Image: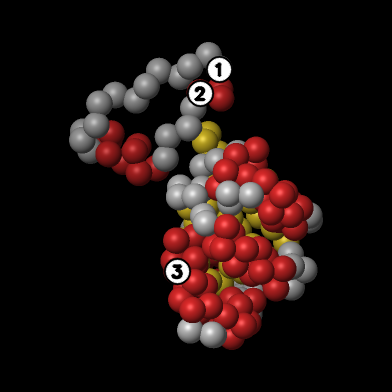
Amino acid sequence: MALGVKAVEAGYSVLFLTLETLMTRLARAKHENRLERILQQLAYPKLLILDELGYLPLSREDASLFFRLLVRRYERGSLIVTSNKSFGDWGEIFNDHVLAAAILDRLLHQSTTLNIKGESYRLKEKRRAGLLGRAPAVPSEPRALPSEEVLLSDLA
């Protein structure tokens, strides 16, 4: 992600993970009684970028681990989260609407949300290369376009 590259160029420590990779690390650490150590390590980078939130639902245990990470980083470091789901769908992602509300409460405090609409750059590149058909016509209602939420949360 370009924002992560710019942060590194500015001298900030940055960690980029997909949500799946993050959750695998946290679950393994919990199983091996190393959770506090991993949470401490994940709280260290000035910027943590989490990609692909919402592509796969999380178990309640995973959602709880995610919340613990947010609490650990809250007002200590910045966070960028990308998701193809609107905030209203996060209760389903986390399998708990109350926990999703608590997560959003922390993420949205002192944050900026960007809604990017349209085709992803990957699909555009495939079309340019002739590997896909023509781009769909722009519908009259903008919500019909795919979109991705990018949440820039200044937790520090």
Residue 25, position in %: x, y?
47, 73
Left/right placement of residue 148 relative to residue 112 reads left
**What amino acid is labelled 3 in the image?**
Thr
- Per the image, the residue denoted by label 1 is 141
Q: Residues within 10 Å of mark 3 (few under 14, many from 20)?
A: few
Asked if residue 32 can be seen in this view, the reply is: yes
- Element on which disc 1 rests: loop
What residue is at 66 percent from the left and 63 percent from the top?
Answer: 67
Mark 3 lies on residue: 24
Disc 1 residue type (three-letter): Glu
Counting from the top left corner in percent of width and height, residue 106 is at: 75, 58
Q: Is label 3 in a helix, a strand or a loop?
A: helix
Give the residue pinned by disc 2. Answer: 144
Q: Which of 19 and 113 is in front in this view?
A: 19
Which dot marks residue 92? none
The answer to whether any part of residue 112 appears in the image is: no
Left or right placement of residue 12 versus residue 128 in this view? right
- Real-space Cα separation, disc 3 to disc 2, in angstroms: 33 Å
Question: Which residue occupies 69% across, 54% down?
Answer: 99
In the image: residue 40, left or right of residue 128:
right
Kindly check if marks 3 and 2 are in contact, taking CB atoms under 8 A apart as contact: no
